C-alpha cells in the first residue's frame, strides 16, 4: 500500500495531485480545438477530462486504442471511435456496454437512424454517436458549367470523369491503401445495388458478395478514372487532404469528400481562399455508380465509447453523454463542419446560419441514404483484404479484380491466407 | 618483434600436458577460482538476458502453434504447424521475401561501392579531415524515420525536388504509384542513410592495410588500379565481408523507411513489415509469431550463406590471428 501510494505520488498520470480522478479521452485529430473546449466544459467537481491525441488515420487510431485495451488499460476511459470498429471492440470485450437507462438517453428518437445503428452490437449499446459524417460531390461551378454538366440533376461517375477530362480538370477521390479507399469501394458497390459481404453476424463465415455485377460496376468506375486524363497524378496515394488544393488550381476539380470541406474553403481573414473562390464552390449528391440507380454516399463519423477496464465507469458514462450532447454536436458542426448525429441540431438556428441551407439538406439526405460499411467483428480483415486486392487503382480490372478480391477475402476470413 | 622473451608466469610454468589430456592443459586452482568468480559475476547478466530475450523467443515459438487473435482471445486453439504451412504456401510471403532480398542485394551492393569511395576519402584526406569525416557521417546520425519522411517529401511531386532535378521525369510523376519507382525511392533513402556506416566499417579495414605493402607495390611499378585490386582490396577482405554481413542482415530487416514512405503499398512490403501487420495491426498473434520465427530462421540462413559463401573469418576480422 505504501509502495503504491509512493509510486502514485511520483507518477503524474495517477492523479492530478488530489483525489479528483482524471478521465483520459482519446480523440482523433478532427476538431481538436473544439474537443479540447468540450473536455474542459464537461469536466465537473467530481472529475477532469483530459484530451489524448490519436493518430490521423482510422487504422492507426484503432491500432493504438486496441493495444492499450488488449493490455486491460484502466486509464483509457473515453475514446472517439470510428463506427466501423465498434463491433470489433465490443466483441473483444474492450468497450463497456451502456446501462439501459443511459443507452435510452443517448439513442432517443432524435438520433438519425444511420448513426444510431453503428453503436448497437449483439443486442447491446456500446457507444454514443457524437457526430455523423457523409461524403458529397464538391465541385468548381465554373468547371461544371464549361463542361456543360447539369448539376441540378443526379450525375454518374462516368459523366463527372468525362466532364473533368474534357476541360483539363481532375476528379479527386481517396485511393491510397487505407480505410477511405474501402469507403469509396463500398459506396461504389452499394451504389450498383450490391454489397461487399453479407450475413456479417456470422463472423468469419460471412458471405462474400463482391464478385457480382455490382462489384464489376464499381471496378469499372475505378478503372475509368485511373485510365482517364482526369485522374490526379497522385491517385494511388490520394487521401482526403491531397485533393483539396486542386479545387482552385487550373480549371478545378470534382471531388468526393467529407463534410469538413465546406469549412476548409470558407474565406477567413488572412485565410487561403477568397470569397470569389468560395462562391465558385458547388456541391451535389454523391455520384451514381450506375445511371438511374440512386447513389449510396459513404457514412462515417465518431462514436464515444467507454473503456471496459476504466476505474471510474460511472463518471466515464456521464462524461461520454456530455461530450456527445446536442450542444456539443452543434459546436463541432459550427466550428469544424463535423455534422450532428441528432436531427434537432440540424434545425438549430446557429447551424442554419453557419451553413448554406441546401447543404444542410444534402448532408441529411446523404446520411439517410448512405451505405454503411460491413458491420462485423472481423471488419478489419474485410477492409484490409479489399484494400490489398483493389490497390493500386491503376491496376483494377472489372474482369478480374472483383473475383480475385472475393477469393482472397474468403481465404483471409478462413485464416488460409496472409493479409 | 621484441627481442626479449616475455616473462613466464608462475601458473603457466606449471601447465604441462598430462598423458591422455594432450589438448587440454591442466587448469590451476587459481585459474579455476577466477573462472568461478567470473561465472558468478556474469550470472546476473545471463539471467536478465535469458528473461528479456530467450523468454520472448520461446513464447513466440509456443504461440506460433496456435490460432490466436487478440480480438477474440477465447477462440485460441492449438493448430500445430498450420500457421507455418499457411505462410509457406502463401504467395504474399514469398513475394515479400523476394522484395526484401531485392532491397538487401541492391542497397548493400551500392553502399559497398559508395561506402568504399567515402572510406578512401576519409582515409586519404589531408585537409579539413574532421569536417569531411563528420559531414560524411551525418546521415547515419539521423533517425531512420526522419530520413524516411525527408525522402518522402523529396520524392512527392507537390513539394519535392527530385522530379525537377531528374531529366526525363515529368513534374507530376508519382514515385509512390507503382512498385518499381516506389522501391527505388525506398532504396535511395536506405542507401543515403546507411552508406556512412558501411564506409566507417571499411575505413577500419583500410587503416589495417600496411603502407609498406602499398609502397612496395608502387616501387615495383604497379598502377593505382593494380594497387587497389591486388594490394588494398585483398588485404581488406575480412573487413569488407564483415561490413557486407552486418549491412546485409540490417537491410534484410528493413522496416522504417517502408512504414513512412509507402506503408507497404504497391508491393513495397518487406518481410518485417508483413510480421508487423500480422501482429500489431491484425492482432493475429499466432500467425505473427510463426512469421517472426520464419523471419528469424531466414536471417540465420542469410548470415550462414554470407559466412560460408564468402568464407568470412570473423576471428581474423577482429585481428585475433
Image: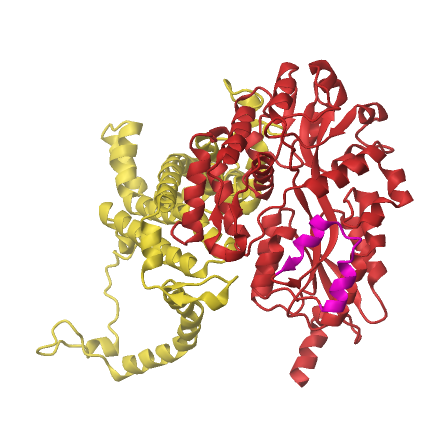
Chain colours: A red, B yellow
Give the position of the N terminus of chain A as an image quadrant: bottom right
Residue that appears at 26% across and 52% down? B313
**Residue A113: horizontal and vertical position, in percent?**
72, 50
- Magenta segment includes A265: no
**Residue B301: horizontal and vertical position, in percent?**
29, 52
Residue that appears at 72% across and 69% down? A99
* Quarter occupied by residue B310: top left
Residue that appears at 60% across and 35% down? A191
Does residue A61 show up?
yes
Q: Is residue A399 above or below residue A3?
A: above
**Residue pushed farthest front?**
A292
Does residue B142 show up?
no
Along the line of sight, the residue nearer the viewer: B318 or A407: A407
Q: Is residue B25 above or below residue A358?
A: below
**Residue B221: horizontal and vertical position, in percent?**
24, 27
**Residue A254: horizontal and vertical position, in percent?**
68, 26
Q: Which residues are magenta?
A: A99-121
Report the side of A254 relative to B233 (left or right).
right
Amino acid at each position: 500500500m505504501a509502495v503504491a501510494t509512493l509510486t502514485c505520488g511520483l507518477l503524474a498520470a495517477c492523479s492530478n495531485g488530489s483525489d479528483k480522478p482524471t478521465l483520459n479521452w482519446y480523440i482523433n485529430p478532427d476538431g481538436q480545438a473544439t474537443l479540447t473546449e468540450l473536455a474542459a466544459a464537461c469536466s465537473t467537481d467530481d472529475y477532469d477530462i483530459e484530451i489524448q491525441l490519436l493518430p490521423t488515420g482510422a487504422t492507426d487510431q484503432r491500432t493504438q486504442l486496441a493495444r492499450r485495451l488488449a493490455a486491460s488499460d484502466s486509464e483509457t476511459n473515453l475514446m472517439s471511435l470510428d463506427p466501423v470498429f465498434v463491433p470489433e471492440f465490443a466483441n473483444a470485450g474492450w468497450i463497456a456496454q451502456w446501462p439501459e437507462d443511459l443507452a435510452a438517453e443517448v439513442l432517443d428518437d432524435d438520433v438519425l437512424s444511420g448513426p444510431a445503428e453503428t453503436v448497437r452490437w449483439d443486442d447491446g449499446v456500446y457507444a454514443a454517436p457524437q457526430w455523423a459524417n457523409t461524403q458529397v460531390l464538391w465541385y468548381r461551378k465554373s468547371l461544371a458549367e464549361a463542361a456543360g454538366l447539369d448539376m441540378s440533376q443526379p450525375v454518374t461517375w462516368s459523366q463527372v470523369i468525362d466532364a473533368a477530362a474534357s476541360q483539363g480538370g481532375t476528379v479527386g477521390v481517396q485511393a491510397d491503401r487505407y480505410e477511405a479507399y474501402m469507403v469509396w469501394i463500398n459506396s461504389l458497390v452499394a451504389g450498383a445495388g450490391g454489397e461487399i459481404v453479407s450475413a456479417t453476424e456470422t463472423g468469419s463465415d460471412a458471405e462474400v458478395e463482391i464478385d457480382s455485377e455490382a462489384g464489376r460496376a464499381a471496378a469499372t468506375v475505378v478503372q475509368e478514372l485511373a485510365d482517364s486524363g482526369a485522374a490526379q497524378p497522385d491517385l494511388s496515394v490520394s487521401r482526403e487532404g491531397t485533393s483539396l488544393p486542386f479545387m482552385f488550381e487550373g480549371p478545378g476539380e470534382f471531388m468526393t469528400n467529407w463534410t469538413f470541406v465546406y469549412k476548409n474553403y470558407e474565406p477567413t481573414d488572412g485565410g487561403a481562399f477568397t470569397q470569389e473562390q468560395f462562391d465558385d464552390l458547388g456541391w451535389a449528391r454523391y455520384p451514381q455508380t450506375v445511371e438511374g440507380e440512386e447513389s449510396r454516399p459513404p457514412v462515417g463519423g465518431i462514436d464515444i465509447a467507454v473503456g471496459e477496464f476504466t476505474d471510474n465507469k460511472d463518471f466515464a458514462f456521464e462524461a461520454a453523454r456530455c461530450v456527445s450532447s446536442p450542444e456539443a454536436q452543434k459546436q463541432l458542426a459550427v466550428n469544424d463542419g463535423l455534422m450532428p448525429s441528432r436531427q434537432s441540431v440540424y434545425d438549430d438556428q446557429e447551424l442554419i446560419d453557419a451553413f448554406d441551407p441546401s447543404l444542410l439538406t444534402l448532408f441529411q439526405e446523404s446520411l439517410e441514404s448512405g451505405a454503411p460499411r460491413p458491420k462485423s467483428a472481423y471488419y478489419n480483415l474485410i477492409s484490409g483484404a479489399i484494400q490489398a486486392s483493389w490497390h493500386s487503382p491503376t491496376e483494377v480490372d472489372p474482369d478480374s479484380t472483383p473475383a480475385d478480391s472475393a477469393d482472397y477475402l474468403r481465404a483471409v476470413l478462413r485464416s488460409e491466407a496472409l493479409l | 618483434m621484441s627481442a626479449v622473451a616475455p616473462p613466464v608466469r608462475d601458473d603457466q610454468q606449471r601447465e604441462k600436458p598430462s598423458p591422455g589430456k594432450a589438448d587440454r592443459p591442466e587448469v590451476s586452482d587459481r585459474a579455476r577460482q577466477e573462472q568461478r568468480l567470473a561465472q558468478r559475476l556474469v550470472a546476473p547478466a545471463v539471467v536478465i538476458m535469458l528473461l528479456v530475450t530467450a523468454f520472448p523467443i520461446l513464447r513466440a515459438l509456443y504461440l506460433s502453434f496456435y490460432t490466436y487473435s487478440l480480438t477474440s482471445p477465447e477462440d485460441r486453439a492449438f493448430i500445430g504447424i498450420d500457421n507455418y504451412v499457411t505462410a509457406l504456401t502463401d504467395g504474399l510471403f514469398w513475394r515479400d521475401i523476394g522484395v526484401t532480398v531485392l532491397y538487401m542485394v541492391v542497397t548493400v551492393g551500392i553502399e559497398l561501392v559508395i561506402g568504399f569511395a567515402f572510406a578512401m576519402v576519409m582515409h586519404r584526406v589531408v585537409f579539413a579531415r574532421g569536417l569531411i569525416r563528420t559531414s560524411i557521417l551525418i546521415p547515419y546520425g539521423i533517425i531512420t524515420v526522419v530520413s524516411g519522411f525527408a525522402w518522402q517529401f523529396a520524392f512527392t511531386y507537390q513539394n519535392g525536388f527530385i522530379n525537377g532535378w531528374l531529366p526525363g521525369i515529368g513534374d507530376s510523376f508519382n514515385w509512390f504509384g507503382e512498385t518499381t519507382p516506389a522501391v527505388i525511392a525506398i532504396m535511395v533513402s536506405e542507401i543515403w542513410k546507411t552508406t556512412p556506416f558501411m564506409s566507417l566499417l571499411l575505413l577500419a579495414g583500410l587503416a589495417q592495410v600496411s603502407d609498406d605493402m602499398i609502397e612496395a607495390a608502387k616501387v615495383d611499378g604497379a598502377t593505382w588500379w593494380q594497387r587497389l585490386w591486388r594490394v588494398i582490396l585483398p588485404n581488406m577482405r575480412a573487413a569488407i565481408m564483415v561490413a557486407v554481413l552486418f549491412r546485409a542482415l540490417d537491410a534484410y530487416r528493413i522496416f522504417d523507411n517502408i512504414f513512412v514512405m509507402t506503408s507497404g503499398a504497391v508491393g513495397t512490403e518487406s518481410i518485417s513489415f508483413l510480421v508487423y501487420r500480422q501482429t500489431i495491426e491484425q492482432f493475429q498473434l499466432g500467425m505473427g509469431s510463426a512469421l517472426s520465427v520464419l523471419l528469424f530462421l531466414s536471417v540465420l540462413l542469410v548470415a550462414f550463406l554470407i559466412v560460408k559463401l564468402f568464407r568470412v573469418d570473423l576471428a581474423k576480422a577482429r585481428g585475433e590471428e
